[in-house]
């Protein structure tokens, strides 16, 4: 499967994404959504495989809490950076084929969640927990 995202803002840096196959029994897995974090844009791209469409969500919970410093054990390496929405993973499905999607900003210690019921509908009100 290949899909080119035609319109996006710069800078672009994708993090760990999640694939949500709603009906694994479907031979073609046509009812599938892909949730793609953009670390630098602090946004989440949602790709709808069935309709070959995508949309973007932004939310304050996607933003970094502040700078993070990486240091190696010997202290010879230091790097400071700010990273927004970094990765997303999916919980178990409910009876309506929705799940909780858990996500974190790279420069954060907070874990957030949102129901995929919201993500799968373009222009839904995004409410993080």
Image: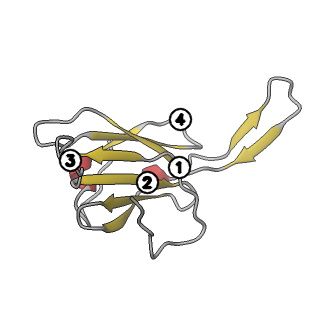
Q: Which one is in front in this view, the residue at disc 4 or the one at disc 1?
A: 1
Q: Position of residue 27 (x, y in %)?
A: 20, 47
- The residue at which mark 4 appears reads as 109
Label 2 CA crowd tier, 10 Å (few <14, some 14–19, many 20+): many
Q: Is residue 7 visible?
A: yes
Label 3 CA crowd tier, 10 Å (few <14, some 14–19, many 20+): few
N-terminal of the pair, mark 3 or mark 2, is 3
N-terminal of the pair, mark 4 or mark 1, is 1
N-terminal of the pair, mark 2 or mark 4, is 2
Locate the C terminus and report the quarter of the image it occupies: top left
Mark 4–mark 1 Cα distance, whole angstroms, equals 17 Å
Identify the residue shown where x is 57% and y is 64%: 12
- The residue at which mark 3 appears reads as 27
Mark 3–mark 2 Cα distance, whole angstroms, equals 24 Å
Q: Vertical placement of 92 versus 1: above or below?
A: above
Q: Which one is in front in this view, the residue at disc 2 or the one at disc 4?
A: 2
Q: Vertical placement of 118 versus 112: above or below?
A: below
């Amino acid at each position: 499967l290949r899909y080119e995202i035609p319109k996006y803002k710069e800078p672009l840096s994708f993090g760990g994404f999640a694939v949500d196959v709603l009906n694994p029994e479907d031979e073609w897995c046509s009812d599938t959504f892909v949730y793609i974090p953009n670390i630098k844009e602090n946004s989440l791209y949602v790709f709808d495989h069935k309709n070959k469409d995508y949309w973007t969500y932004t939310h304050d919970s996607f933003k970094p809490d502040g700078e993070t410093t990486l240091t190696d054990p010997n202290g010879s390496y230091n790097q400071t950076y700010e990273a927004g929405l970094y990765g997303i993973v999916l919980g178990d499905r409910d009876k309506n084929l929705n799940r909780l999607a858990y996500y974190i900003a790279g420069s954060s210690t907070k874990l957030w969640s949102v129901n995929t019921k919201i993500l799968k509908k373009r222009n839904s009100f995004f409410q993080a927990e």
